[in-house]
Amino acid sequence: MYRYRTHILFRLSVTACLVVASLAGAEFIFEEEVPIPMQDGTTLRANVARPAEEGQYPVILMRTPYGKPGKRSGDMKRYTEAGYVMVVQDCRGTGSSEGTWDPFAYDVQDGLDTQAWVGAQPWCNGSMGTAGGSYVGWTQWASAPGASPILKCAVPVVPFGEAFPGLAYYGGAFQLALLMGWGTAVGGVNLQPDQLQEFFRHLPLQTYGDQFEKPIPFLNDWIAHNTNDAYWRQRGIDGRYDEVRIPILNIGGWYDIFSKPVLDLVTQVRERSDNRLVRRNQFVIVGPWAHGVGKQKVGELDFGAEAQRDIGDLQFQWFEYWLKNRDTGVEDWPAYHLFIMGENHWRGEQEWPLARTQYTPMYLRGGGKANSSRGDGTLSPEPPTEEAADVFTYDPANPIPTAGGNNLVGAKAGPYDQSEVELRDDVLVYTGEVLAEDLEVTGPVTMVLYAASTALDTDFTAKLVDVHPDGKAFNLCDGILRARYRKGPEAAEPLTPGDVEKYEIDLWVTSNLFKAGHRVRVEISSSNFPRFDRNPNSGLPFGTDTQLHPATQTIYHTAQYPSHLLLPVIPR
């Protein structure tokens, strides 16, 4: 994640080396491969950069599986010049650190042990902040609950805090491209894009990690543990938001793989921390970005110059305030700094979801022929009475291709024209009237679907789309729900074929101004591949299927079964 690449596949036998580094005339002390003992006896190694003048300084810590920077790092020059020590450590089992590389498994305790070590060093003044993105954002959150008193603040960029619901499983479906694409790379297997697409179709999923010349056992573990059990709770902060006692600045994007977690983490601490000042000092910035933040153009859309942000500068201001007590205006920042797409403008808010939200239903309507954008499906504020149901066949051997969205590996990320996908008969398309005035949608989006299937288990998907006046249809957010989990993530229950069931599909979050002249659209189907694994429709235990079975899906929109999109509309 963030900057994923193959791990170093060998271990170095090294001792710490101290040198005086010079970059463009600025000198600092650089120590390589400094050993840091963990409480279980494992030694992790770090590179340490500190100002040339002896003394005590605040510390910036990064814990990464992607390889620690050398003495020519620009960040090390910047921070040592500004009077900081930088410590960048290889996570357990990566780089030159000892132990077994098992993603997420050891980061909670290893982070706490590293904090204690930093606090005991003669060059530490008793104050430390953490930095970094993606997995390095996770390592910050992992050891935020119950942290050492020396930890004063954090800047996690595109982070998550719970590996099961925020990373691996979403609506009961497995985030295949993300976990298996990233997992093979950090497991030491390099695949070309076409090879990766072929491997995504491997069955049974429970043996996914065995198909490479170098087996990757943790890929199979991720399939074997398909509920939020003790395995995953070890690989997350396990809901311990009340134990977070530091100011945190989260930075994320509406098209990032962690768009919802980046908001939820801050909101949870604001609601649950046992420290009033900490609750107040949780901040989040969400731009129109995918996993690479700060950009103006994302996917096929240009969001204007205002979308560009210097993330490094924001991070520096945060550390100057919390670690050096310098007034950089941080406490004047809004708690939630949100980019409103479409309008292409930043706006500050004080809570999430916004208190003034008007949750507005838009009902599926039509005459039973909503298949594809050529069909008769409409979206209306008026509920249906008696209307013919829409029917499509979901064939997992020919799934709906992922066309943009919240992706990282194996599929494009960001907004893309959905016109080609919407030509398929196994995609139901419902489109609203041309808007006479602007409509802002900011917040969590939900699809309430009444549907029946011929299968014992299947998936239902929904995608919110902004249709521009030229006919191009750009995705905003989407979701999926595995039918066996329709009554909750801990209540797996097979379907009775033909029975109508209610599905509440979480489409995660967005902020978009549907401009006058645009139209609101929702797509309904049963797959989004390879972002999510294909449901084989068999009802067998997850990961065991070797065959795929088509299913007939029926979507209802009547007075009794009023399927609708629930939009968080913001009055303007």
Image: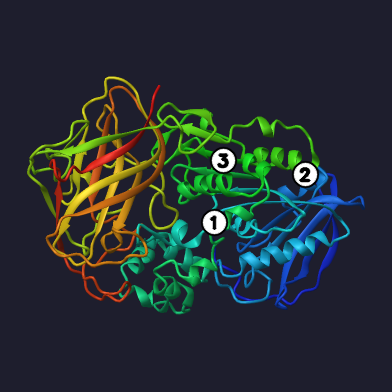
N-terminal of the pair, mark 3 or mark 1, is: 1
Residue at 68% across / 61% down in the picture? 68
Q: Nearer the viewer, residue 473 or 462?
A: 462
Q: Which mark is residue 284?
A: 3
Classify mark 1: helix, strand or loop. loop
The reply to whether residue 292 is in sight is no
Dot 1 corresponds to which residue?
A: 161
Classify mark 3: helix, strand or loop. strand
Q: In the rendered view of the protein, which quadrant contains the C terminus? A: top left
Dot 2 corresponds to which residue?
A: 323
Left or right: 154 as drawn, with respect to 294: right
Q: Position of residue 168 (x, y in %)?
A: 43, 62
Residue at 28% across / 23% down in the picture? 517
> What residue type is disc 2 on?
Leu
C-alpha distance separating marks 3 and 2: 19 Å
Callout 3 environment at 10 Å: few (<14), some (14 to 19), or many (20+)?
A: many
